Every structure is written in C-alpha cells, then in structure tokens.
Amino acid sequence: MIHLSLHLENGQIVYFTTENAAKCTQAPEVTTHASFFRLFTQNRFARTLLHSEVPKYYTWNNRNETWQCRKQGQIVLEMRSSDAFGWVYTVHPILR
C-alpha cells in the first residue's frame, strides 16, 4: 500500500533553512501525490484506471520519485486496495 501525501496544488509542506530557501522555492520536493497526477498526464493507460487500481499496475520508486510500471508486467490481483484515502482529522481553528 502506498500512502499519498495529500495536499492542494502547490500546497505541499516545505521545510527550509536560510541556506536552502531559494532552492526549495524554485524546485519543491516531488511528492507521491503530485507524481500520481503527473502519471495520468504522461501515460495513456494510467488514465483508464481508477485511483484504487493504480497499485495493481504501478509501483512507487523512491530513488527516482516516480510511479513505474511493474517490472514483470503482470498485475497483482490479490493486492488489497481501497477507494478511501484514510482517516482525515480536523481541528477547529479556535482550538489550536
């Protein structure tokens, strides 16, 4: 199971210091979430899949920070998947 780091467009959390601030703003870190949507823009087959079907055909490559086709070319039928993103916790702004 791959957890996507959910965020709004250009809204991912960025940690920086005075030394690397310029680099972080010009080239933000690639996230699984942003790369997930890039997969759909670059791959015609991926556009035919539902969100929950992607892990059956693709794996996340940490080194390249990209989604890649499964190397053996076979789908993983017994892959457990869900159409839910998981638990979402909210905190009222007054309670912060």
Image (spheres, rainbow, N blue to C red):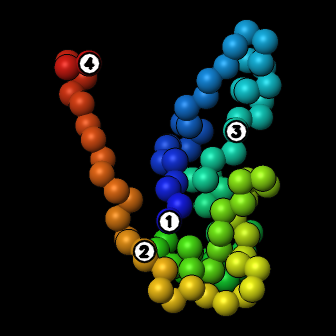
Given the image, on which type of amino acid does mark 2 rest? Ser
**Which labelled disc corresponds to residue 81?**
2
In three-dimensional space, the C-alpha distance between marks 1 and 4, rounded to whole angstroms, equals 32 Å
Q: Secondary structure at mark 1?
A: loop
Dot 1 or dot 4, earlier in sequence: 1
Q: Secondary structure at mark 3?
A: loop
Locate residue 61 relative to residue 2 in the image: left or right. Answer: right
Residue position marked by numbered label 3 in the rendering: 29
Quadrant in the picture for residue 19: top right
Residue at left offset 77%, top offset 30%:
26
Query: How many C-alpha atoms fall within 10 Å of the one at disc 2: few (<14), some, or many (≥20)?
Result: some
Residue position marked by numbered label 1 in the rendering: 1
Dot 4 or dot 3, earlier in sequence: 3
Q: Secondary structure at mark 2?
A: loop
Residue position marked by numbered label 4 in the rendering: 96
Residue mark closest to the camera, 1 vs 3: 1
C-beta proximity under 8 Å, tags 2 and 1: yes
